Image (cartoon, rainbow, N blue to C red):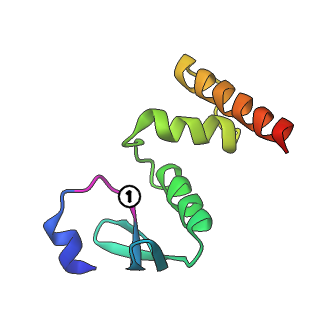
Amino acid sequence: MDNFIKDGNFTQPFLVGLGNPKNPEEYFVYLDHSAVPAGTDATMAFDLLYKSFDVFNVDYPMYQFYTFFSTVVYGATKEISPQVRSFNIMLNQNQNQDEQLS
């Protein structure tokens, strides 16, 4: 993991998965030259990554992506941008169509 991180220029914190790229065995949140174990479940690892931005008071690197999760998934942000609102509407419409087909 150290060689991979030394070679890259990454915005921190970020998520590292070890093992098979299609099915990592273990996840870590990497910040300031430290790898914090994040478990074996991708959802839980992303949850830890997402929360680390607030804990360490770091700006989101992909603002719209993380704002979507902040607003729609976590309900932590009250203001919703037009882009996030429209993406959320599209996801809900697709989900409703899938349910009707079932």
Image quarter hosting the N terminus? bottom left
x and y, in percent, of residue 101 in the image: 82, 39
> Which residue is drawn at the image coordinates 56% and 78% (left, top)?
39
Per the picture, the main secondary structure of the magenta-coloured stretch is loop
x and y, in percent, of residue 13 in the image: 38, 58
**Left or right of 94: which side holds 27?**
left
Image quarter hosting the C terminus? top right
Amino acid on which the number 1 mark rests in the picture:
Pro
x and y, in percent, of residue 44 in the image: 61, 66
In the picture as drawn, the residue positioned furthest to the top comes out as: 82
In the figure, 5 relative to 75: above or below? below
The one nearer the camera, 2 or 100, is 100
Q: Quadrant of residue 97?
A: top right
What span is in magenta?
Answer: 10-15
Give the residue at mark 1: 13
x and y, in percent, of residue 45 in the image: 55, 67
Q: Secondary structure at mark 1?
A: loop
**Left or right of 93: which side holds 46?**
left
In the figure, 43 relative to 84: above or below? below
> Which residue is drawn at the image coordinates 57% and 36% (left, top)?
68
Residue 8 in sight in this render: yes
Q: Residue 34 magenta-drawn? A: no
Q: Quadrant of residue 33?
A: bottom left
> Which residue is drawn at the image coordinates 14% and 68% (left, top)?
7
